[in-house]
Image (tube, helix red, strand yellow):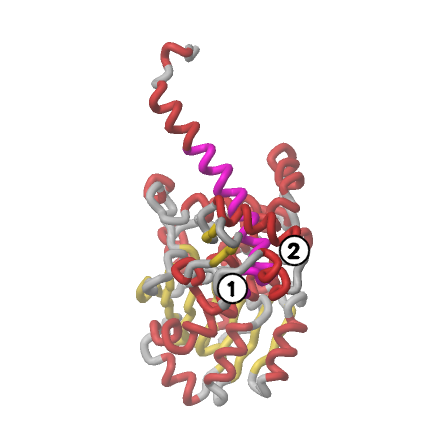
Amino acid sequence: MTTISDIDQGKADAFADRMMGVLNDASTAMMVSLGHRTGLFNVMGDMPPSTSQQIADAAKLNERYVREWLGGMVVSRIIDYTPDGKTYALPPEHAAFMTQAAGTDNLATFAQFFALFGLVEDQIVDSFHKGGGVPYSQYPTFQKIMGEISSMVHDASMVDTILPLVPGMTEKLEHGIDVADIGCGQGRAINVMARAFPKSRFVGYDFSDEGFSTARAEANAWGLTNATFEAQDVSDLTVKGKYDFMTSFDAIHDQAKPGQVLQAIADALKPGGTYLMVDEDASTHLEKNLDHPIGPLLFAFSVFHCMTVALALGGEGLGTVWGIELAQEMLEATGLKVEEIKRVDGDIENSYFITTKPS
C-alpha cells in the first residue's frame, strides 16, 4: 500500500497544478463555445476597444450576460481589458483563430462539441456499466456542427488542395466521371465538387437523411443539376462497379461495420477506380500517440461520440483512434491497393489514404 512517505511531493504538486489547468481550460472551452455561438467573437473582431454595453448592443445581446462572459474571457487571457474606461478588445492575433474571418483556422468552432458531449454524459456513464452505446439521435446538434466545420474545410481546400492529392483526378473530374461520397452529412463536399466540375455526376450517401434538406437546398441555391443525395446504410450498399471516384471524410471510423462499409466501397468502384479516404492521423499503437498534438481530444471524441454511436448499433466500436496501421490493413483486406498516405500542411488531424481498385 502506498503511504504519504512514498509520494514524490514535487511530482504530486506538479500534477495538482496540471489538474487545476485542466479544469480552467475545460471551463474556458465552454465559454469559447458561447462566444462562437452568440457571434461575440465575430463582433469583437471588427470593433475597437469597447465597453460591455457597446459590445452587447453590437451583438444584439443582453449586457449582463455579455459582461460576465467578457470577465471569463479576460481571466482566460483571450480578451484584453483596460480598467480605465472599462473597455474590452479581442487582439488581432487571437481573432485570427476565433472568428469567422479566420476560415479553417477558426478553432472556436470545435469548442461547441464539449457542451454537446455534456448532454450525453449520463448515458455514457450508463454504457460504461451496461455496455451498448448512445445512439446518433441523442446528439441534436452534431450534424450542424460538423456541417459548419465541413463548410470551412471544403470551401477552402477541396478543389485546390485535397483533390489534387490524387494524381490526375482534377483532369478526370473536368472531363466528367461518376463520384460518390460516403457519410456525406449535410453534403457540402458533394456540392462543392459538383459546382467546380459540372461535367461530373455526384451522389452523397448517408444512413440518416437528417442533413439532406440542407444539402438539397444548397444544391438548388447553387443551381446544381449534377448532385443528388440518397439515404442509405452504406454497409448494405448494393451498387457494383459504378463509380470512378469515391470519397469519405472522417466517416469510416464511426461506422458500425467499418470493414463491411469498406468492402461495399471497393465493390462500388469501377476497375481502376480511386477511393480517397480521409480519416484520423494517429497510430494504432497507443504508445506512439503520447506526443500527438490533439491526442486527448481524439480519445474524448471517441468515447463521447464515434465509438459509442457504433456500439449503440451493435457495431464494432472501432473508435476515432483506430490508426493508420489498422486502416491500411482493413483497406487492403477489401482488395484495394493503398497507393500512398498523404498529409496536408496545417491539417494535424487527418491522413489522406489514396487507394485504387485493380483493373
Q: Residue at x 31, y 66 (%)?
A: 339
Q: Is residue 316 visible?
A: no
Q: Is residue 161 visible?
A: yes
**What distance separates the C-alpha of mark 2 from that of mark 1?**
29 Å
Q: On screen, 196 above or below 281?
A: below
Across the whole image, how many numbered discs are drawn on residues?
2
Left or right of 1? Residue 206 is right
Quadrant where the C terminus lies? bottom left
Q: Which residues are magenta?
A: 18-43
Which residue in the protein does label 1 denote? 149
What secondary structure is the stretch in magenta mostly built from?
helix
Answer few, some or many: residues within 10 Å of disc 1's Cα (few below 14, many 20 plus, some between 14 and 19). Answer: some
Task: Indicate the amino acid at tag 1.
Answer: Ile
Q: Nearer the viewer, residue 264 or 315?
A: 315
Which residue in the protein does label 2 denote? 63
Quadrant where the N terminus lies? top left
